[in-house]
Amino acid sequence: MSDTTPPSPGFPPPLPPVPPAAPKKSRTNAIIIGSAATVIAAVVATGIIVGQSGDDDTRPAASGPSLYGSEGTAAAVTDPETATETAYAALTPADFTMELRTTKRQCFGSAGCNVTVEPTLSYVGAYKGIDPDAVYSITYEIRGDQSGPVIETAELSDETSLSYTPSLISTATASKKVSVKITDVVKQGA
């Protein structure tokens, strides 16, 4: 008997034809339009926020903690028609830093030095925590004098004006470090 089946081809049969794919729509235009709309909305929103946040002192301040902390912040009165001024929290020594600036030094060999120092004050408390109409007495202690600590007081007015008397201290040696520490802050007339 003879085999009547034809020999199998050396390659697979062809696949049925695939219909051509529909061309893909570009989304570039939609992305550009969406981005432009987002930018315009952001600019408009920023303009509204900036326009409403002017320096209007009659508007009450936001309550709660702020970017600058909650201690020592100014607490605004809620009814601007019945209130005439803002109430400020009491300031503490922690609301300030102080350094000493040496303005004069006269040394006498092994007998030590006479040093004249002046305070340099910086406010580190809450934003708008200082009453611009008040005068604050700031008491500080200078360390490094041969006789012991020297206590002085400076007056802060108009938020930035510091009145003080330069301090003359005597150090044991030219290399003696002089330091300062704020011990008390009192609002005068309070």
Image (cartoon, rainbow, N blue to C red):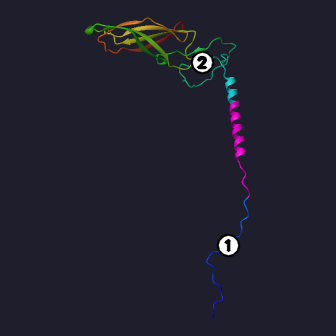
Magenta span covers which residues?
22-44
Dividing the image into 4 quarters, which one contains the N terminus? Answer: bottom right
Residue that badge 1 annotates:
14
Residue furthest to the front in view is 10
Residue under the image location 67 percent in, 20 percent down = 54
Most common secondary structure along the magenta stretch: helix
Dividing the image into 4 quarters, which one contains the C terminus? Answer: top right
> Along the line of sight, which residue is nearer the eye, 13 or 88?
13
Which three-letter amino acid code belongs to the residue tagged 1?
Answer: Pro
Mark 2 residue element? strand
Which quadrant would residue 167 be assigned to in this image? top left
Residue under the image location 70 percent in, 38 percent down = 36
Which quadrant would residue 5 be assigned to in this image? bottom right
Position in image of residue 10 (x %, y %): 61, 78
- Label 2 environment density (alpha carbons within 10 Å; few <14, some 14–19, many ≥20): some
Q: Is residue 41 above or below residue 56?
A: below
Residue that badge 2 annotates:
75
| Alpha carbons under labels 1 and 2: distance apart | 85 Å
Residue furthest to the bottom in view is 1
> Along the line of sight, which residue is nearer the eye, 162 or 89?
162
Residue under the image location 67 percent in, 25 percent down = 50
Residue 115 appears in the picture as rendered: no
